[in-house]
Structure formats: structure tokens, C-alpha cells
Amino acid sequence: MYKQETMDGNQAAAYASYAFTEVAAIFPITPSTPMAEGVDEWSAHGKKNIFGTEVKVVEMQSEAGAASAMRGALQAGVLGSTYTASQGLLLMIPSLYKMAGELLPGVLHVSARSIATHALSIYGDHQDVMACRQTGVSMLASSNAQEAMDFGFISHLSAIKSRIPFIHFFDGFRTSHEYQKVRIVDYEDVKKIVDYKAIDDFRNRALNPEHPVVRGTTQNPDIYFQQRESVNAFYEAVPDIVQGYMDSMENITGRKYRLFDYYGAQDAEMVIVAMASVTGTISEVVDYLNARGEKVGMVKVNLYRPFSEKHFHEVLPKTIKKVGVLDRTKEPGSIGEPLYLDVVKAFKDMPNAPVIVGGRYGLSSKDTRPSQILAVFENLKQDKPKDGFTIGIVDDVTFKSLPEADPINTEPPGTISCKIWGLGSDGTVGANKTAIKIIGDNTDLYAQGYFSYDSKKSGGTTVSHLRFGPKPIRSAYLVNNADYVACHNQAYVHHYDLLKGLKKGGTFVLNCSWDMNELHDHLPADMKRYIAQNDIKFYTIDAMKIASEVGLGNRINMVMQAVFFKLAKVLPVEEAIGHLKDSIEDMYGRKGQNIVEMNNKAVDRSLEALVQIEVPATWGMAVDDTIEDPDLPYFVEHIQTPMARHEGDELPVSAFIGMEDGTFPMGTTAYEKRGIAPMIPQWQIEKCIQCGRCSYVCPHATIRLFLLDDEEKARAPETFETKKATGRGIDHLHFRVQVDPLDCTGCANCADVCPAKGKALVMQPAEQEIRMQEDNWEFAMTVSMKDDLTNTNTLKGSQFRRPLLEFNGACPGCGETPYIKLLTQLFGERMMISNATGCSSIWGASAPSIAYTTNWNGKGPAWINPLFEDAAEFGYGMALGVEQARKRLAELITEAMSSSIPPELKEAFGEWLNIMDDGEESKKASERILGLLESYDLGDNEIVQEIIKRKDHLIKKSIWAIGGDGWAYDIDYGGLDHVLASGMDINIFVMDTELYSNTGG
Ligand SMILES: Cc1ncc(C[n+]2csc(CCOP(=O)(O)OP(=O)(O)O)c2C)c(N)n1
Ligand code: SF4
Ligand code: SF4
């Protein structure tokens, strides 16, 4: 009897890898980090590999280091592995060439991810693995969590036997993070199929002074080529070796795999060739079409490199006339993507070769739905099918996209699909994982869980996509035909189209504190109409109330989990609740009986407190009240707002015309107004000693100091109370501390640091503060800055300057953002920032939320995220560029001084030359020069005209390389060291959190 467990692809691959790994050299990168963490944890708990030893795990300073350490271990005769993705895999490329060239049987498990191009993306596609085709590694692709385990083993077994290193890859964030029921392969069984002779030979070949050899020589034209060709036989042997292990694994598991698996009609005329998770979706569409009398099929590529044309042709029906090849990558400028070109070559010179076209799909985890696959088959049906197409997007610029076909339901009958909206870190995702495990581990049902997140560090939105059913679940796409939708946050009714895709007669549960009248007032008209017109069974529950009454505070996850088990009807309620209570005992037993009791109580109370809403017939005719804001910038209205509503997928390519290079506008977070704080600080005017500390520490720039003159005071709202400002030069003004209630995250840092006796800031419930302070904040934004009256080099003085980093998406209480915010207050108008990847690049500029902003005069920090590994050198390059540009400007100005220009301008130029490297002084000198240039007509002075063209360089720039300690002390240590030693005028700022906060590890 086999064991099965619910797990994600990362865990499945890590489990297989552990068996054959002696040294794991690692470096964290999303979404592969959990594999390395799993191996590390098992090793720490003494888990043994098949050789009876624990894996030695070493974390290196970068992936380049990890791959080199792994290669060193292999040369020492020890089996090495690593886990990576994206930029990490790119950094390993030099080592991959070496590993393959030296015939070392290492294995890399890769959760394939996008590459940073015009933007960074942590989501899945095959750009990273495709960049390794040329290195000489073998490549095996898994399409689901079960294969991640099976092919994980096969990769190691085959690497050992063939001596060729393997990349075993699967789709990042789909397979890597998707929960599925997996049948566990026992290490004892695998042990029986290992080629121990090959392992002995490998160990005997190791570098060892007892029988020394030399490797890695330098070679000349006479022999390099021939020795390079001498490896061919090893590659020719790989396909049969892999197939051999697929067969041996079949004997153990009963699961049959071939190098290429064919699925569909044996007399198919049209087939799609693809690899990894999309093949699950394609197989559903193949079933759907064949059931309707079509003759279609799919070739799923398992062993991608070496590509065995022989095995490929073996599985193909002889009847095929048209082939569509899907690549999850983009190679701009090529005549086709790589898998497509391989397939074209495979058919070259064949009589009656089919028509072959290729297309791209799924970049950066773009969801690939059955209707898009249907579009590929529709395209193939045409006399001249489109080549080089895309699916999943609307390309209204270069017109490469295929029109999406009508939605089809290809899930097997009996599948229950659920979609659950939660607030990041509210426990929803964890609870859903538990629910899947309960159902997966305790019943014969298959279960699938996929979790999508937005890029807010905390307080963002999570959507859990769950499926349960009697048949294996192949649907590698988001739930868009739901039986059950739950929303754990009442504010979302205004933000998202929650019910999109909820089936007629489906169930909707809303966690809210509203009674029927309030529902009537609060629910948007389109939601009411959908509920009424589609016979939706609508329930509400006040989960917050129950959680706080039973002592769980604001942790509503147990309440909502109980509701799920009652309403989603995946299992009979009593049975489900029984399992839930067992899981409570397992999870919280160690924390004490009272915690267990609280959770059990939460479950019982929830079942009683659920309210079914009698939907009034009038809801079916509810009328929208449209509020349009004519002042919204184009970007905010047409790009940011749809993205914020989770409707960014629908934006066409033309939305990005003018932004093709990845440029985004500044200051867009100011339009978000997320309102996520449960509690907000209230200013106690009498107690305040006007120290400015609250503003100084606020991570989100949502509490600020304001100085009003009499005119401003006179037009302030009544509740905008002020007190006489204290301090030299400002005591004729009115002082106020103002909170921005809709952007505050409620972290309470400001209240914590407030030194006033009895605290001048007291946290109060958000709803009341939002009501009282919303307008006051609006007014405060119209108050003029008076920072010239204070010394900005003091704590208090600096806080009268406008921060040019505001409303960022960092976690509440973040310790990084206040520092960078302060830098922008001091230098923001002339800053250029090279920001290493890390938390700071995410909270600073996750599209469309750009927290860096500009002053009233349009000036502010120019910001770029180069990469994680090169921010110091990149910053140095920017500094070099600026230095060169200003040098030329100085030459021109010197030259202009001896041309015929007004004496006043000559004097201003001279003054500028003296202070051009002083930030503040160069600002003043620049203002003077610009004023003079405007007042004189010097159109015929060519040198002056050249100077005007370069006027943006008059002010000295403040150039910064910033990032975390992972950047500065690990991956870019060498670059940073070199830059510091160069003597260049560049500032380095390290946020030393002693963690790789952004990726774990
Ligand atoms: C080459 C490469 N490897 C790994 C990553 C993944 N990664 C992104 S940020 C990060 C850690 C950042 O840590 P640190 O520099 O300390 O900044 P923090 O997030 O703690 O602020 C890692 C490992 C990457 N982006 N590129
Ligand atoms: S509670 Fe936190 S986010 Fe809100 S104003 Fe205070 S420091 Fe800023
Ligand atoms: S920290 Fe407290 S005392 Fe200081 S300015 Fe802020 S509210 Fe006033």
C-alpha cells in the first residue's frame, strides 16, 4: 500500500532530492527557497539519505558561489544538489558549462521563473531554464507535484548513470506552490534501482592525491574542439537511460511515463506540443474536444534535453496534419521560440510533414485557461494558421494574439471549485492549506490548492483557489467557475469583482458586521444584481465578533474554515468538523488546552452564527451609482485602478505604449487609500511637546508635522486644531501633527516613541478616526512647506520637509522605510538611487504602486532596481555617467565665460564653477543661472545653448546604492568593496536586518 500526503511541488522535489544528496549548496530565491529550506530542516532533524547520512547544507554568498561549491563537492566524489530559479540560475550558468564539461552528475531542481527584463517578476515561466539549453545539462520537466517527486528521483538516478548533470524543472508558483495529493515513493524502493557501480566509479574518479590527476587544463586550437566532441556518446546515451529509469519507476509506482507522453485521439489530426503544468490544462481541452467528435491530441515533452527525435516520433499518431507548439518563454528577435524550433527540426525533411506553428503563453504566470487552448486548436483549423502567436493577452499593437475562445468548463464532473478572498497575514491561506490537507489526507478525494498574492508586503490581498473531486485534478489554471466564493474582508465588496465566475446557484459567504439594512446600504449594485439574478445562496457571518468573543482576537481563520466546511459541502458536515477538531488538537495541542478550547469554541459558534440572507427581488434591479473623478491622471485611471481591482489581466498591450522600457510614473501610492489599519493614532494636542519623533519613525509617512501661517489657519477646517509652534524662527506659526488615516497601517510605532507625558498619540478604532481625519489630511496637503525656516539637519527640522517616499507597501512597523524616507527628506530632490533587489525594491516600486514621489516642483528621487547582485557597480556606473556629464558642462561653462555674455551671467557661472560639487550651494547657483538665462536672449550663443541643453546637470546629484545586508555583505560584497575602494563620490546605505527578509533563508 502506498502512502500519500498533500504537499506542493517544492516539497515533493525536495523529498526526492534529499535521497541522493550528500552536499546541498544553496542560496534563496523565490519560488525555489522552500526546497532548500525543506532539505535544511530535514537535515537538522537527522533525516538520512539513501546512503544513511544526513545532507550537509551550506548557504553560500550567491548562486554563483552555490554552484561552484556544488561542483567542488562533485569533484571530490560527493553527490551535490542545489535549488534555484531565475537570476539565480543565470548566475550558475558558468558552473553549468563546467559541470557538464567535466561530466559531473549534479542535479539542480528549478522552480522555473521569469527573468528580470523591463521589470522583475517572481512568477513562473521558462525563461530561466531556456537560458541554460546551451550549457550541456539534461533537462527534465515536471508538470505537477506528483511528477516533481517522480521526475526528481529520475533526474538523480539518470545523472548518476549517464554522468550528465540534470536540471529538473517545474513551473514556479504553479507546480512549486500548488498543493496536490502526492503518492510518496519510498526511499527503500528507490534504493533498489540505483546504479551503485556508477556511484563507485564516480567516487573513484574524484580528485584525490592518492591517485592524482589534473583537470581543467588550458587548451589551444589543436585539441579543444576534438575533446569537446568526445562527449557526444554520453549525450546519445541519456534518452535511453532516462526511459530505463522511467520504466523502473513504473515497476515501483505503477505510474507510466515516456520521454514524450502522447495524450488524445490515436487518429488525431491536430496536436499541441508543450511541456510542464500547461499540459494538464491541454489534456482537459483534448478530452473536451474529442468528446465532441474532434480528433485532437497533445505531446507532453518530459525530457527536453537531450531532445530525442526518435522518441518524439514514436509517440506521434501518423495521422497528424497540424502541430501547434507552445513555448513559455520569449526570445525577442529569434525566428521562433526554442521548443518550436526543435519541433520544426524534428520534422525537417520528413515526407508529408505537418504544418507547424508556434506561440507564446503564460509569461510571468499569466493564467492559461482552457478557452485559450481552445483558441490554439481553432487557429490550427485555419487554412493558414497564425505563427508566432500569443495567447492569454490582447496584443492590439503588433496583433500577434489569438482571440480567446468562449469560456468552456473542462473540469471533470463532480469537481467542487472554491475561491476565497483574504487579507494578507489574516490566516486565510494557512487555513485553506489545512482544509486541503484535511480533505486530501482523510478521504479518497483529490484536492488542489493554489494561492495568489499581490505584491504588498503585508495587508495585501490573497485569493485561494481550491478544487476537490473524485478524479485527479489537472486544471493548472485559476478557478473561474466557482461553486463557492468566500470573502473574509468586508471592505473588498467595493474593491473587487468578488463574484466573477461564481456559478448560477453557487454559494457566497461574506464576513461582515452588517445586518440586512446595512447590507442594503453597503453592497454595490452590481453585486446585488449578480446575487439576485444568478440564484446565489448568500450567507453572512460576523467572524470578528466570534473570534474576539472566544478569545482569538482578530484571528478569524478558524471561524471561516468552519463555515467553509459547512457550506462548501465537500464532505458531510459532521465528518468535516470532526476532522477539523482533530487538526486543532494537532496544531495547538502543544500550546495548551485553553488554545484548543478557544478554537473548538470558534468552530461551534460559527456554525450557529451563520446567517442565510433572504435576497430581496429588488436587488435584481439595483442601479449603479457611478462616481467619477475627473482629476485622476491617465495612468491611475487606466492602468493602476484596473490592476488594483485584480483586472490587470484584461489590459491590452497598447496600455503600455510609451512605457515599453519599463518606466513608471512616480507617486502612485498616493491614490491607493487602502484603509487597512484596524487602529489609528489620535493626536492629543495639549500633551504634544512638538518633538517630531512620531513623524520621524513612521514607516509609511502617514503622520507628519505641519506649520500654518495665519491665512492657512483661517481657512482650515474647524477640527483642524493647532497650537502655537515652538522653536526659533517658527514661533509665529501654528503647529499641528496630522495623521493620514486611509494610508496609516496602524503599526503604532508613532505612539510607541512619543515621549510626551501620558502620550500625545493614542491608538483609536479606525472607523472613527477615518471619519474625523480624512478631510483634515486633505487640507494638510494644501498647507505650504516652510522648511526654510528650520534647520533640516536636526530631527525635528527634517520633519517639516516633505518625504519623497510615502504610503509604501512595506509591512506595518517596517524598520527599513523610515531611514530611506529620511534620506528623501534630506536629499530627495537631487537623489539618484540604485536599489538592490530585496524588501526595499519591493516596497519601493511594485507596479503599479510606486512609493517614490516628487515635490511641488516635480523634482524627486530617480530610482532604479538594477539587480540584486550588482547594485553597487550599477550605482558606480551612474556616478561615472553623471561625473562625465558634469565635467563637460563645466568645460562649456568655462568656455562660455570667455564668450560675449552679460557680466551678471558670467559672475553666476564663475560662482557655479566654485561650488559645483556642493549639493545645497549648487542648487542656489543653479537657480540663479536659470533665472538669468531666462531673462536674456542668448539664442545666437551656441555655447550657451549647449549649456541650456545640459541644465539638468547644474545641481550636484546625490548618488546612492542602497539595499539589504544580503546584498551588501553577501552577493555584491565584491562589487561593493571595489566601489568603496574606488574613491568615487557615491553613498552606500545598508539596511542590515540580519536576514534575507525578502526571500526567506
Ligand atoms: C541572483 C539573485 N539571487 C537571489 C535573489 C532573490 N533575492 C531577492 S532579495 C533577496 C534577499 C535580500 O536580502 P537583503 O539584501 O538582506 O535585503 P532585505 O530583503 O532583508 O531587505 C534574495 C535572496 C535574486 N533576486 N537574485
Ligand atoms: S500607526 Fe504606524 S503607520 Fe500609522 S501613523 Fe503611526 S507610525 Fe505611521
Ligand atoms: S512624538 Fe508625540 S510629542 Fe512628539 S511631535 Fe509626535 S505627537 Fe507630539
Image (cartoon, grey):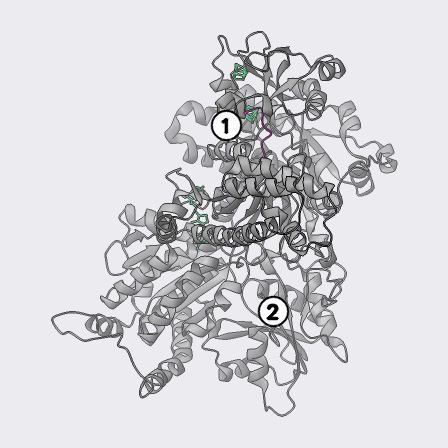
In this view of the protein, which residue sits in the foreground, 266 or 842? Answer: 842
Instruction: Give above or below for 567 relative to 971.
Output: above
Mark 1 within 8 Å of ligand 2, using the beta carbon: no
Q: Earlier in the sequence, mark 2 or mark 1?
A: 2
Q: Disc 1 designates what residue?
A: 600
Mark 2 within 8 Å of ligand 1, using the beta carbon: no
Quarter of image, res 799: top right
Question: How would you rate the neighbour count of disc 2 (Cα within 10 Å): few for under 14, some for 14-19, many for 20 or more?
Answer: few
Which kind of residue does numbered mark 1 sit on? Asn
Instruction: Give above or below for 878 relative to 356.
Output: above
> In front: mark 2 or mark 1?
2
Magenta includes 801? yes
Q: What stretch is highlighted in magenta?
A: 799-804
The residue shown at (66%, 69%) is: 286
Residue contact between numbered discs 2 and 1, judged by CB atoms under 8 Å = no
In this view of the protein, which residue sits in the foreground, 815 or 976? Answer: 976
Magenta includes 324? no
**Visible in this render: residue 293?**
no
Quarter of image, res 824: top right
From the image, which quarter does the N terminus lie in? Answer: bottom left
Which kind of residue does numbered mark 2 sit on? Pro
In this view of the protein, which residue sits in the foreground, 490 or 842? Answer: 842
| Horizontal relation, residue 318 to residue 957: left or right | right
The residue shown at (61%, 34%) is: 563
| Horizontal relation, residue 283 to residue 580: left or right | right
Quarter of image, res 634: top right
Instruction: Give above or below for 780 relative to 830.
Output: above
Q: Disc 2 designates what residue?
A: 332
Disc assigned to residue 150: none
